[in-house]
Amino acid sequence: MKNKVLDLDRIMNLYFRYGVKNLTMDDVAQELGISKRTLYQQVTTKNELVDMVLNDQFSKYREAVSSIVDKEDGSIRKLYCVYKLIADFFKPLTPVFVYSLNKMSSKLAEELHRKYNDFIVEIFGRIVDEGEEEGIFLVRFKDDFARLVAGYLFQTNEKGAVLQMAEIDLNNAFYLQTSGVCTDHGRKVLNQLMDNPKLLTA
């Protein structure tokens, strides 16, 4: 029955709102409507709970991205859908969460960042490799492209909050960044899709 009473998504939202370091186990138990004793029957320490929640979030992220890569047709469509999913996935991220996670454990924060970054580079690399076979992408730029996209999607505004991009801004950014790794043929396909955005997610 372990972890059956824990709503990990709900706890993740608490971390986003209040940060990891300042949120007590009492706060978590109260939010979930369970006793602190019940909570400690599921996890032995606060660090174990944080690790469990973050790993669960990363697993869901990997599953969602991998599902897109497996089911979508065409490398540009795959790239766009992954691009949009990443932007949407990290919208709830707040400065207080990032700051408090670093304060609690800089090692955990670095490991988490590395896991996400490595996975993004891996996925974008796979899509660009596929696109090269289609005559769409120039594969020699794939690593720089993945880092560029990751840096853009995770950027912050002047107050430190994660940038909340409107869809029009996301589409413009996607076009500008993606066109730089396209072949001439790839740019023609990209232009056709961007002229009719419904085709990107149809």
Image: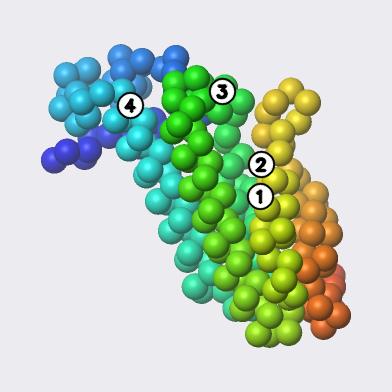
Distance from disc 1 to disc 3, alpha carbons, whole Å, reads 19 Å
Distance from disc 1 to disc 2, alpha carbons, whole Å, reads 6 Å
Distance from disc 4 to disc 2, alpha carbons, whole Å, reads 25 Å
The amino acid type of the residue labelled 4 equals: Asn
Q: Nearer the viewer, residue 5 or 138?
A: 138
Residue indicated by mark 2:
154
Distance from disc 3 to disc 4, alpha carbons, whole Å, reads 16 Å
Residue indicated by mark 1:
150
Image quadrant in which you'd find residue 72: bottom right
Density class for disc 2 (Cα within 10 Å; few <14, some 14-19, many ≥20) is: some
The residue depicted at 53 percent of the width and 69 percent of the height is 69
The residue depicted at 42 percent of the width and 44 percent of the height is 57
The amino acid type of the residue labelled 2 equals: Phe
Q: Is residue 114 above or below residue 46?
A: below
Q: Position of residue 21 (x, y in %)?
A: 44, 18
Specify whether residue 30 is in view: no
Do tag 3 and tag 2 residues touch (Cβ < 8 Å)? no
Please tell me how many numbered marks the rendered image carries.
4
Q: Which numbered marker is on residue 99?
A: 3
Q: Earlier in the sequence, mark 1 or mark 3?
A: 3
Secondary structure state at the residue bearing disc 1:
helix
Distance from disc 1 to disc 4, alpha carbons, whole Å, reads 27 Å
Q: Is residue 139 above or below residue 153?
A: below
Secondary structure state at the residue bearing disc 3:
helix
Density class for disc 1 (Cα within 10 Å; few <14, some 14-19, many ≥20) is: some
Report whether 66 appears left or right of 11.
Answer: right
Specify whether residue 83 is in view: yes
Image quadrant in which you'd find residue 127: bottom right
